[in-house]
Image: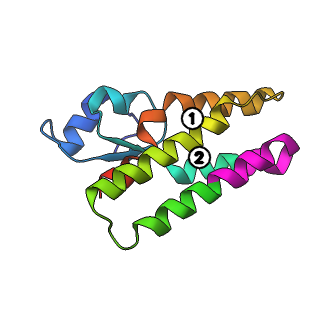
Amino acid sequence: MRRSREKKVLKENLGKNFSGTIVCDGDKTFPNFTQKLQRCWAHLLREADYLAEHIDEAVPLQKALHRLYSQLKSSLEDDPPPEERVRLANNAERRLRYWLKKRYRNEEIREFIQKMHNGFNHWFTFVTTP
């Protein structure tokens, strides 16, 4: 591996015909390589935890994100059929939109919300793509 995240490095490592799903942070290189992405919940939850530790306004959001992720993981334990997975993903998207539409006073929280907006189409890939 190299420190670079350039598209050519991804092609060299994964191959130009890579057809899998990449779990990634918000780096712009990945969507240039494939649209089959799953944004990393560990990064998301870690940042939410940091914000909640330092900014009281972030606590409800942090708790809601942890609850949403935990409930999704639990719902997927029995490997539900595709139509149930779609229902779960749609419900999760609706719940996340609720938090993204709220108005936040703190600039750090607003930047965090923007990151979630930017990756919105890739937060629930793990639900619909086992």
SS under mark 1: helix
Dot 2 amino acid type: Leu
Which of these two is toward me, 7 or 39? 39
From the top left corner, tell me how far across and down residue 11 is, in percent: 21, 35
Specify the quadrant of the image occupied by residue 116. top right
Q: Earlier in the sequence, mark 2 or mark 1?
A: 2
Q: Residues within 10 Å of mark 1 (few under 14, many from 20)?
A: some
Query: Compared with residue 75, is residue 90 higher up or lower down, i.e. above or below?
Result: above
Can residue 126 be seen at all in this image of the molecule? no
Specify the quadrant of the image occupied by residue 16. top left
Residue named by callout 1: 116
SS under mark 2: helix
Question: For the magenta stretch, what is the residue range?
Answer: 49-65
Specify the quadrant of the image occupied by residue 5. top left
Q: Residues within 10 Å of mark 2 (few under 14, many from 20)?
A: some
Viewer-nearest of discs 2 and 1: 1
From the top left corner, tell me how far across and down residue 48 is, in percent: 69, 47
Q: Specify the color scheme.
A: rainbow
Q: Is residue 61 left or right of residue 44?
A: right
Marks 2 and 1 in Cβ contact (< 8 Å)? yes
Q: Is residue 62 left or right of residue 33?
A: right
Dot 1 amino acid type: Met
Q: Residue at x 32, y 68 (%)?
A: 79
From the top left corner, tell me how far across and down residue 96 is, in percent: 58, 41
Q: Main secondary structure of the magenta part?
A: helix
Q: Residue at x 48, y 41 (%)?
A: 25
Q: Residue at x 40, y 72 (%)?
A: 77
Residue named by callout 2: 44
